């Protein structure tokens, strides 16, 4: 007859946080080992791609980890991927360029209107 393994000491229900693995000891006895939850890789906040260079751990373990394992040396280091950061920079640059172009066009139209007024007076 097969030996059975039951939950011990902890929560007696088969929940997500209470998973066990059955292990055979050197004495031939079957014992339940509690298995921790699998850690999800940190993902980019914009596109959802897993961030390379950042440790994959459960949230509480990040507290005891050095900063070099939690970020990469770039703006938006442990939060956004390189492609999204590049897009943000380009977008900001193009918006600023567009503002400058609008300003120049407005000045040119105003100058043209002034010139028309002067010609009309003569």
Image (tube, rainbow, N blue to C red):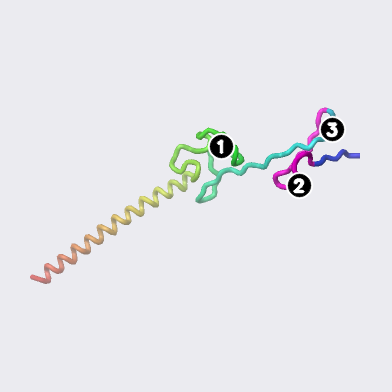
Residue 34 position, x and y percent, is: 73, 38
Q: Residue at x 67, y 42 (%)?
A: 37
Label 3: how many Cα within 10 Å (few below 14, some 14–19, many 20+): few
Query: Considering only vertical position in the picture, is 121 above or below 83?
Result: below
What residue is shown at x 79% (from left), y 41% (from top)? 7
Residue identifier under label 2: 14
Find residue 65 and report its image quarter. Answer: top right
User: Which of pointers 3 and 2 indicates the residue nearer the eye?
Assistant: 2
From the image, state whether disc 3 or disc 1 is nearer to you: 1
Between marks 3 and 2, how big is the CA–CA gap? 22 Å
Question: Which SS class for mark 2?
Answer: loop
Residue under pointer 1: 63
Task: Give the secondary structure at mark 3.
Answer: loop
Q: Which residues are magenta?
A: 7-26
- Left or right: 61 in relation to 116: right
| Residue lying farthest to the front in this orientation | 9
């Amino acid at each position: 007859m097969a030996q059975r393994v039951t939950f011990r000491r902890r929560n007696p229900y088969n929940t997500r946080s209470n998973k066990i693995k059955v292990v055979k000891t050197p004495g031939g006895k079957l014992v339940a080992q509690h298995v921790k939850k699998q850690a999800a890789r940190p993902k980019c906040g914009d596109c959802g791609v897993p961030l390379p260079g950042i440790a994959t751990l459960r949230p509480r373990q990040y507290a005891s980890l050095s900063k070099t394992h939690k970020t990469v040396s770039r703006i938006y280091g442990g939060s956004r991927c390189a492609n999204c950061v590049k897009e943000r920079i380009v977008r900001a640059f193009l918006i600023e360029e567009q503002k400058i172009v609008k300003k120049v066009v407005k000045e040119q139209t105003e100058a043209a209107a002034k010139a028309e007024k002067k010609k009309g007076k003569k």
